[in-house]
Image (spheres, helix red, strand yellow):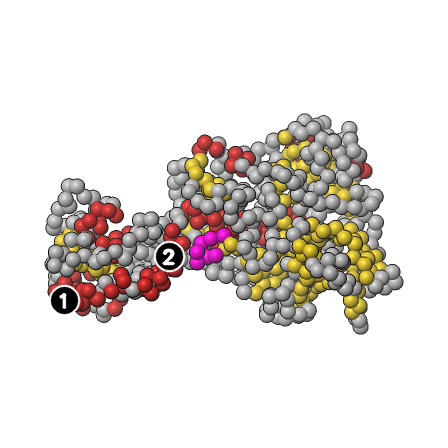
Amino acid sequence: MLFIFRSYSSSEVLRYGSGSPPVGIDQILRNSKVRFAKIKSRRSDESFQGDSAGSFLGGSSSIEIPNDESSKSDIVLKRDGTGPTVVGYVNDFRNERQRPLARALVEQKVDAIEKVVTAAAQTAVKRCSISKNGKKHTETHCSDLNTTLFAYNSAWFPRILCGQEVMSGDVIEVPVGCEDYEVGLSTVPKPPVSGDGMDPIVIKSSLEDIFEPESLESVHCDVPCKQQKDMQGLRRFVAGEQWTITFTDADAFSNGNARLERLEHREDHFYSTQSFKSSVPHTFFNWSQYSHLNTNSIDWLSARNKAVYLVDRSCSTPGSRRHKYFSAMSAVVPVDSYGLCGHNIEVPHEISIGTSEGRVEIMKKYRVVLAFDPSTEKDHISPMIWDAIASGSVPVVVGAENMRSHLPEGSFVWSGDFSNWDELANHVKELLDNKSMWESYHTWRSDERVMSRFSVRYEFARTSAICRLCRWSYAKKYGLGWNDERQEVSEPSFRRRLCVSGTNKIISTPFQEAWFSKNDQIQDSHEPIQEGPDTCGSTKVDFVLKSKGLRVDRKVSMHDSVVDITLKEIFQDASSAAVVLRLTFPGIENIAGAHFKHTHRLVPTSRTHQVSSASMQDGNKKVTVMLDWVSNITSPSKSTLEVVVMEDSEIWKEGDVKRVRIVLEDFDAKNEKESEFFPSAFCKKMIKDFSDPLHIFFAAS
C-alpha cells in the first residue's frame, strides 16, 4: 500500500483509479523484466510518499530484537488465553531469518535506484521518502507540480496504481491525473465472486515460465481461466503468485508425491489430488461421464452367470493383495478375464477395455464385476469401480478403506465386510445364483434419499478439476470465501462493505471503531455519539472525529478484503493520557485470546523497520491487525483488539502519519492447520503490500 500526501497540510488522498478496464490475460503474462511505460504526466500537488516499511511476522514467541530498540519490548506474547493479552512489536532482520524455528527466507538484493534509472532513462533518481535514524524524511521536490515521479514494484505480485497495473519488477511513470495514490491488487476495490469484472486466473507449469498469450488455452469455467498448453508433471503454478500446487489424479500408493503433507500450506504448497483433504479434490468421478450412474440394472436372465475381470496388466506378483483376492475368487467363482491378469477370453475387436465406454459395454453382460483396486488409500476410487456401478451390474470392490463414504449405499459388495478371501468368494458365488440377493444390490437406484446423499457428496464434480482450481485460486488470491463442499467462490464471512455512522463517520461495519484516552485509573471514552442512520457503500471515508477534547484526523479505505486506517493527526485539548483505538469484531469469540505464540514467520521485505501485529480467529474467520510503528496491541476481552496509538505524554508531530491495516479473511480449517499461528497466503501478500509498498522516486538533476 502506498500513501502520498501533501507536505504542509498533511492532507492525504486515497482512491482507486475509476473506470479502469479489467486487467487482461496478456497483461498478466508480461514477463518480469524491468519495463518502462512512458506516460506524459502533469503533476498534482499530492506528492510525498509516506514511508511505510517493515515486515510482518505471522506468528511469534519471545524473541531477541537485535538493535537498540530492544529495550522497548523483547516479549511478543506475554500471556496466552483471553485478555488482557499483550502483543509487542517485531522486527525483520536478516539474522532472525537464520533462527532454526523461523522460516528461512532469502532476502533478494535489488538495487531499486539502478532499476529506475535504467528503465526511466534518467541520469539519476532519488527516493521521495527515506528514513534516517528512525526518522522519516520527505523530499520537497516531490511536491513540485512539474516533478516527474516514477513507481517501482518490488513485490512478487502485480499492483494497481491509479488504474494502471505495475507488474513485479516494473517501473512506470506515475500516470497523468493520478491525484489519489491507493495501490490495490485487483482492478476493482471489491473483487466480485461471480459474473463480470473478475480478473483472469492463469495456470502454468513453472514458477519461472514466461510465455505468450498464444501458448494458452481457455478453460470452460465460470471464472476467467486459462492454462498453459501441454503441461507436464505434477506441479502447477498461478501467474502472479508464489504458490506450488500438486495437481494429479494419482493416489499416494502409486505416486508418493501425491501424498498430502498437512502443514505444507505454511510454505504455500497446496494440493489437488484424489484425497478429499485436498484444497481441490481431483477425482475420477464426474457427472458429465457418469450422469446416468443410477441407470436401471441389467436383466438377470440375459446376463451371464459369471464374474468379469478387466485388469489390463500382469498379475505376475503373487504376493500382491489384488492377486490374492483374484486367486481366491477364481477358485470358487467362474470368472471371464479380458485383461492380462488371468486372461482367458478375448476382447471383441470393436471394443477397447482401455476406455470407460468399452469397459461398461462388457460389464453389462455379466451379473458381477470384480473391481479390485491395488490401493487402499483413502478416497481412491478408480474408474473401474465407477464403470462397474454405472454398468448396471453388481461390483465386488476391493480398495480404499473409506469406500463406504463414497459409493451409493447398498450399491456394491465390500471386501471389508468379510474376514477372509474365501468368505468373500463364497458370498459372490451365492450372489450369482440368488436372484433376490442380487436384486437387493440395486434397490439404491430408485431410492431418492441414497442418490440425494451421493449427489451432495459429489456436487463439486459437475465442474472439471482445472476449473475448480481456477475458482480456488481466485478466492485465495483476493481473500474471498470458499465453499469447500461445493468447490465454489463465495462471499467471505466478513461483510465486504464499509459502513459508518451517518453523522460522525465512525466505522460500524465490518467492525466497530472506538477511541478513548487511557491511564492506569480511568478510561475516558471519546467515541462520538452516533446520530442518524449508517451510510454504506463507499470504499473510503475521510473525516475528522471530534469528541470531548479529542480530535482524530483519519482516512479509512476498504479494498481487497482489508481495511486501512491512515492517521494524519491526533490532538488532545488537555489530557496527556495514552490514546487508544479499540476495534471490536462481532462474531469472533477468540476463546484462546489473541495469538502468535510460535517463533515468527517472515515475509521478505526490502526495508527493515518495525511492524506491530496481532491476530485472532474463531470458527472460520480470522482478523490480523498491523501497525507501521512500534506499539502494543492488546486483547482485553472477547472480540476486541486495542491499539495504543499515542503513548502517555506523546505529542503528534506535524507531518507524521501512522497506518493501521486490518485484514479480514476466512481461513480454511480443513486444509490450513495451526492457522492461528501462521498467516495465510493471502495475508502474506497483504503483509508484503503493507510493509513494502511501491517505491516512489523523482528525477534528480
Q: Which residues are magenta?
A: 483-489
Residue pictured at 78% horizontal, 67% vertical:
525
Please tell me whether residue 557 is drawn above or below residue 153 in the rendered image: below
The reply to whether residue 125 is visible in this rendering is no
Q: Name, please, the residue furthest toward the right.
A: 574
Most foreground residue, 84 or 176: 176
640 sits left or right of 391 in the view:
right
Give the image quarter of residue 154. Answer: top right
The reply to whether residue 343 is visible in this rendering is yes
Q: Which quarter of the rendered picture does the C terminus lie within?
A: top right
Q: Is residue 485 magenta?
A: yes
Residue pictured at 18% horizontal, 67% vertical:
437
Identify the secondary structure beneath mark 1.
loop
Name the residue tied to disc 1: 434
Q: Please provide percent x and percent y for residue 54.
A: 68, 50
Residue pictured at 23% horizontal, 70% vertical:
419
Most foreground residue, 87 or 562: 562
439 sits left or right of 616 in the view:
left
199 sits left or right of 17 in the view:
left
**Amino acid type, label 1:** Asn
Q: Please provide percent x and percent y for residue 564.
A: 68, 52
Name the residue tied to disc 2: 458
Mark 1 to mark 2 CA distance (whole Å) = 32 Å
**Amino acid type, label 2:** Tyr
Q: Is residue 538 magenta?
A: no
- Answer with mark 1 or mark 2, whichever residue precedes in sequence: 1
Identify the secondary structure beneath mark 2.
loop
Give the image quarter of residue 694. Answer: top right
Most foreground residue, 122 or 249: 249
